[in-house]
Image: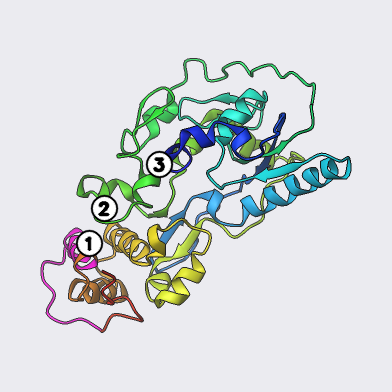
Amino acid sequence: MAFTYKNPARSTDPSRILRSAASIVVGVHGYSQTVVAPDGVDRPTARIARYATADHYGRLAAGLEAMAGELRSLGHRAVVMADDNSLVDREAAWRAGVGWYGKNSLLLLPGRGSWFVLGSVITDAVITHVPSPEPDGCGTCTRCLDGCPTGAIVAPGVVDARRCLAWLLQAPGEFPPAYRTALGDRIYGCDDCQEVCPPNRTVELRSRRGDPWPVEADPGPTIDALELLALDDAALLERCSRWYLPDRDPAVVRRNLLIVLGNSGRGDHADVVAAVSAYALGPDPLLAEHARWALDRLGISSVSAAAPVSGDAGVDRR
């Protein structure tokens, strides 16, 4: 995916972050949510991966910074690393004994599953704790491999990013036609391999029964697709400020939304048809192609008229 792994010499060597590094302290922040499907909504909704529904990395970083502050107060140097692509977080967490690598390549915590973001404090403090690697807890289970909508988990622990919906939703340019139908209602991220994972399902059941482990009360992972598509560039980027968008290009989100509307099955919804038709007739060739695909998917073979595209959506960004 060329984020953390774009520069492996840097991301696997803590001394590149802190020359005097002696220890790594790993922290986790849970983002498990009780997901409730929208009820009585007559407009298409789009789905967001749970980790992106709130500033979970910000909360993790705040906790890690408190830990780093304690180390600094003792005269040590300490640097916080959270979601900045400078350290292979999962490997540090695995070596710290936090969890095991699941077959979907994510780290699972014993009894808690994988609904976590990971981060670390790099410090020159010598910490003598010697962790034991967590034994594999997946056994013969293959639900994540079987549950991936595009077959992106090609072997236990191996994900082909060219098929992974979470990656394709962040990639620039054309969304591969072969995977547009499988995209369903997703506009950012994909949680399918986590949702079918037995440890995660067990955690969700426990939370419903009053388990004291915290469950996030953030807004759910759905958004009004037509409302988001209607925003101008500035408002859309503000709404999606925590998402990774290549070159901060709002066309990436609009492209994804057009596919979602095509998959909505709402060819009878006047607002859906008007919004998609406007882009099909608009000046942006990338969005026009995805809009035409969406119209075809909705069973609409031609566009004779369309409302103007909202905001800055037709701006040529080349």
The N terminus, quarter of image: top left
Element marked by disc 1: helix
Q: Between residues 189 and 298, which one lies in front from this camera angle?
A: 189
**Mark 3 and mark 2 in contact (Cβ < 8 Å)?**
no
Task: Give the Cα separation between the discs numbered 3 and 1.
Answer: 26 Å
Query: Which residues are the magenta region?
Result: 287-307
Instruction: Tell me, for residue 175, which label it has, or none.
Output: 2
Percent position of residue 11, x then y: 53, 36
Q: Amino acid at mark 2?
A: Phe
- Residue ID for mark 1: 290
- Residue ID for mark 3: 2
Q: Amino acid at mark 1?
A: His
Is residue 208 in view?
no
Element marked by disc 2: loop
In the image, is 266 to the left or to the right of 292? right
Mark 2 is surrounded, within 10 Å at the Cα level, by few (under 14), some (14 to 19) or many (20 or more) other residues, namely: many
Q: Residue at x 19, y 71 (%)?
A: 280
In the image, is 103 to the left or to the right of 73? left
Name which of mark 2 and mark 3 comes first in the sequence: 3
Task: Give the Cα separation between the discs numbered 2 and 3.
Answer: 18 Å
Q: Between residues 206 and 80, which one lies in front from this camera angle?
A: 80
Q: Is 299 included in the stretch rendered in magenta?
A: yes
Q: Residue at x 37, y 35 (%)?
A: 148
Mark 1 is surrounded, within 10 Å at the Cα level, by few (under 14), some (14 to 19) or many (20 or more) other residues, namely: many
**Mark 1 and mark 2 in contact (Cβ < 8 Å)?**
yes
In the image, is 286 to the left or to the right of 9? left
